[in-house]
């Protein structure tokens, strides 16, 4: 969905936040206005993401939540406060996509799929006893879950520079993951019941 593309193109959470009273430090962190905290866990970039309460979204969601107003009003507010026309919020004619944009939507799809697999592996291959040897896919799930989540977030809400860096450094990684997912050779057996897999995992703490 692409509402208010002009606003989203022009305004980042990082630049609008100080305008609405948030103190943003040099690394783009601020005290989260969506939960009570004493040290900053809100990351402001093109979008926002709170490592404390999990709140996240784009610049319109940010203002909408900050003032408790619907997205349409948030767009009008941003438009007025920053002197940028909100523009037509229907989809215009599709602009030509750059190679990078095409890759980004492909990468998001692949990484979402991989993340779901990691979650599944973490339950499915969780060691059944404390002295059992850990399954490689269980280890992979523990090791990569956080990174993949971060990567997906940056692709979704990162600044153009951040996305460009990912584009430059992760093409091979994403390609390999894509091959694995579509090769479908790591999903293992499916004989275990859902119930069995969702059992409390002793190593998951
Ligand atoms: Zn928060």
Image (tube, rainbow, N blue to C red):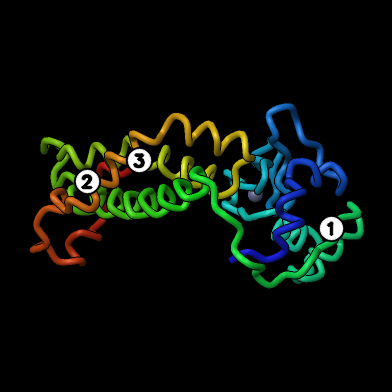
Whether 19 is drawn above or below 199: the answer is above
Residue 28: percent from left, percent from top: 70, 34
- The foreground one among 153 and 183 is 183
Whether 164 is drawn above or below 90: the answer is above
What residue is disc 3 on? Answer: 174
Which quadrant does the C terminus fall into? Answer: top left
Please give left or right for residue 175 compared with residue 76 in the image: left
Q: Which mark is residue 109?
A: none
Looking at the image, is mark 3 or mark 1 earlier in the sequence? 1
Looking at the image, is mark 1 or mark 2 earlier in the sequence? 1
Please give left or right for residue 128 compared with residue 10 in the image: left
Residue 124: percent from left, percent from top: 19, 53
Disc 3: residue Cβ within 8 A of ligand 1's nearest atom? no
Q: Residue at x 74, y 41 (%)?
A: 14
**Marks 3 and 1: which is nearer the front?**
3
Question: In which quadrant of the rendered view does residue 25 lie?
Answer: top right
What residue is disc 1 on? Answer: 78
Residue 188: percent from left, percent from top: 11, 53
Q: Residues within 10 Å of mark 1 (few under 14, many from 20)?
A: many
Which quadrant does the N terminus fall into? Answer: bottom right
Mark 3 and mark 1: Cα distance apart in space: 36 Å
Q: Residue at x 76, y 56 (%)?
A: 7
Q: Residues within 10 Å of mark 3 (few under 14, many from 20)?
A: some
What residue is disc 2 on? Answer: 180
Q: For the residue labelled by badge 1, is the local secondary structure a helix, a strand or a loop?
A: helix
- The foreground one among 79 and 51 is 79
Kindly indicate whether the residue at mark 1 contacts the one at mark 3 (C-beta within 8 angstroms): no
Mark 2 and mark 3: Cα distance apart in space: 10 Å
Question: In which quadrant of the rendered view does residue 140 lie?
Answer: top left
């Amino acid at each position: 969905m692409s509402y208010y593309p002009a606003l989203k193109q022009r305004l980042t959470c990082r630049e609008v936040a100080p305008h609405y009273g948030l103190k943003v430090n040099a690394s783009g962190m601020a005290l989260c206005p969506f939960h009570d905290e004493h040290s900053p866990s809100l990351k402001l970039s093109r979008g926002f993401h709170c490592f404390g309460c999990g709140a996240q979204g784009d610049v319109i969601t940010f203002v909408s939540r900050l003032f408790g107003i619907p997205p349409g009003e948030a767009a009008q507010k941003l438009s007025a406060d920053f002197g940028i026309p909100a523009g037509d919020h229907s989809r215009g004619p599709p602009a030509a996509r750059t190679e990078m944009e095409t890759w980004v939507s492909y990468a998001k799809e692949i990484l979402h799929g991989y993340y779901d697999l990691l979650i599944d592996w973490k339950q499915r291959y969780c060691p059944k006893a404390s002295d059992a040897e850990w399954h490689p896919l269980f280890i992979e799930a523990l090791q990569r879950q956080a990174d993949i989540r971060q990567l997906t977030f940056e692709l979704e809400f990162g600044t153009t520079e951040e996305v460009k860096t990912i584009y430059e450094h992760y093409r091979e990684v994403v390609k390999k993951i894509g091959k694995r997912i579509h090769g479908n050779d790591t999903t293992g057996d499916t004989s275990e019941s859902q119930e069995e897999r969702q059992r409390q995992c002793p190593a998951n703490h």
